Amino acid sequence: IDGFSQNDTFSNLFVSNVLPEGLHTVSITNELTDPSVPYLDIDYIIWTSSVTPSAFNSAPTVEDTSSLFSFTPTAAWTSQLAPSLTGFSGSSGHQTTSDGASASLSFTGSFVSVFGAVGPLMAPYSVLLDGVPQGMFNATKQTYYNMVEL
């Protein structure tokens, strides 16, 4: 199996659908452990106030260019994506190769999905939801895919 798909393939990297309705903050942090796989890429976030198929389809989409995002430290992030990182929503994305750099967004709702890229150069990352660790995740995959739910 070579991992090739004729059609674009999207999958979940981080989703929470057990939130009480209200104000929440999601943060994703680059947990760089290997300099040969340094990238964390943020494309966009969606959330809903109730989790139903129709609500998910009409969920607000916040592109990485929105002022609702907070990228820290600012100097660690760029919107000038590496040439190998393509196919982002809205033709834009933010990337970092800095350990500990994070992207955050506050939202009101009960469901959140964060989108970015996975692939051979992508780094592990951690997620905080309302300041509570949600775990360590790994965006390092054999094949590059864009617009993946982190």
Image (tube, rainbow, N blue to C red):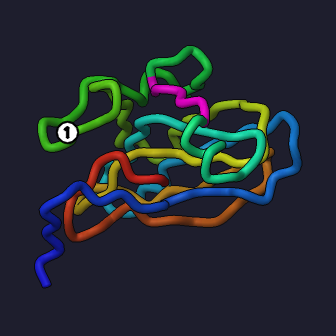
The residue lying toward the viewer, choosing from 125 and 3, is 3
Which residue has dot 1 on it?
86
Residue 103 position, x and y percent, is: 55, 35
Q: Residue furthest front?
A: 54
The quadrant in which residue 102 appears is: top right
Could you tell me the amino acid type at mark 1? Thr
127 left or right, relative to 41: right
Specify few, some or many for label 1: CA neighbours under 10 Å numbering under 14, 14-19, or 20 or more. Answer: some
Q: List x then y, in percent, for residue 51.
A: 72, 51
Please, which residue is most extreme toward the top here?
67
Q: Position of residue 14 (x, y in %)?
A: 56, 57
| Quarter of image, res 67 | top right
Magenta stretch holds residue 77: no
Give above or below for 124 relative to 116.
below
In terms of depth relative to the viewer, which is nearer, 99 or 51? 51
Q: How many marks?
A: 1
Left or right of residue 20, residue 49 in this image: left
User: Which of the pair 13/74 is nearer the observer?
Assistant: 13
The magenta-colored residue range is 59-64
Tell me if 85 is positioned left or right of 104 in this view: left
Evaluate whether residue 85 shows in this view. Answer: yes
